[in-house]
Image: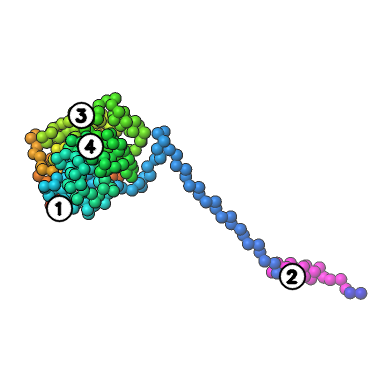
Amino acid sequence: MMPPMHPLRGLAALILVVVAMSACSSPSPTHTPRPSPTPTPEVTPDASGNIPTPTEAPTETVIAVGDIATCNAEGDSATAALIEDLDGTLVILGDNVYESGSDQTYADCYDPVYGQFKDRTRPVPGNHDVQGDRGDAYYRYFGDAAGTPGEGWYSYDLGAWHVIALNSNCDQVECGENSPQWEWLVDDLAAHGNRCTMAYWHHARFSSGPHGDIHAVEDFWEALDDADADLVLAGHDHIYERFAPQTADGAADPEGLVEITAGTGGAVHHETDRQAPNSEIAITDAYGVLVLTLHPDGWDWSFLETDGSEGDAGSGSCH
């Protein structure tokens, strides 16, 4: 008969067994669940159906010039040489050919110097373009880029900006309130909620040049001002001129539209016979192009002259 085990020895043996079992078993790995991916935020159109402009929307460049091509002068070739070195949309401000629009003047005078930019050109007609054939050659040359033949108004977006092209030959197409063009303009402005808006046409509403102020486009200005548009470009007088913000009747207003005339594409220079109210600078002896850099909340401008100098520069903010 074996003697009974001492109680302390039995406890020691039990502890050894437990330790041995623990050493032989591997601990279970701890599992950390992978976080769920962050969903892409949904972009919701605003009340007008427009997608909000991203804060970091890219800038866009516009090169604007009018009153351009004559077969017996060199100014148009000099401004074309400037444009060759610039990327961006070319906005043509009318009077693209002299003395009158025809298939021949476009083929002989305009196309040899500015035809190379045709695929990035967004034009409007001037009085010389519609002289003689009511603009038929103009619409044939530019095709769909000129809008509906016989009308000539259209719009498009560039980056964060909404851009509107209008036909200011008001003796041929109506421009006043309740006209088809004016109603289209009002509807187009209502349909686009962009913070920044620019319009352009040929006949300057305000000018220190010999053509002076053109009242026929006043209703264009009113509609744009009512919609908080920012910038108007024009030609007609063969000068460069920039105005402080103002209303349609010429009253200085920091919330009004800024007008810049760039009728400096190559046609013979005009002299100014007065300084129009709110005119901040007028250049009458230089060919050149207006270069605009369009930002989501404003614009920079520079008037580049064909001698390589910068005649005017600055920046503005959208409303």
Earlier residue among tags 1 and 4: 4
Residue 32: image quadrant is: bottom right
Residue toward you, 137 or 261: 137
Q: Which residue is mark 4?
A: 135
Amino acid type indicated by mark 2: Leu
Provide the residue span drawn in magenta: 3-23
Amino acid type indicated by mark 4: Gly
Residue beneath the point at 17% across and 37% down: 128
**Residue 68: x %, y % from top left:** 17, 44
Figure check: 5 above or below 42: below
Residue toward you, 124 or 17: 124
Label 4, label 3: how far apart the Cα atoms are: 13 Å
Q: Which residue is mark 2?
A: 16
Residues at badges 3 and 2 in contact (C-beta under 8 Å)? Answer: no
Label 1, label 4: how far apart the Cα atoms are: 34 Å
Earlier residue among tags 1 and 2: 2
Q: Residue furthest bottom?
A: 1
Q: Which residue is mark 3?
A: 171
Residue beneath the point at 62% across and 59% down: 30
Q: Counting other residues with Cα less than 10 Å from the Cα at mark 2, is it few (<14), some (14-19), or many (20 or more)? A: few
Between marks 1 and 3 in the image, the one whose residue lies nearer the viewer: 3
Earlier residue among tags 1 and 3: 3
Q: Residue furthest right?
A: 1
Amino acid type indicated by mark 1: Gly
Label 1, label 3: how far apart the Cα atoms are: 38 Å
Q: Counting other residues with Cα less than 10 Å from the Cα at mark 1, is it few (<14), some (14-19), or many (20 or more)? A: few
**Residue 47: x %, y % from top left:** 41, 33
Count of labels in the image? 4
Between marks 3 and 2 in the image, the one whose residue lies nearer the viewer: 3
Q: Which residue is mark 1?
A: 308
Residue toward you, 241 or 27: 241
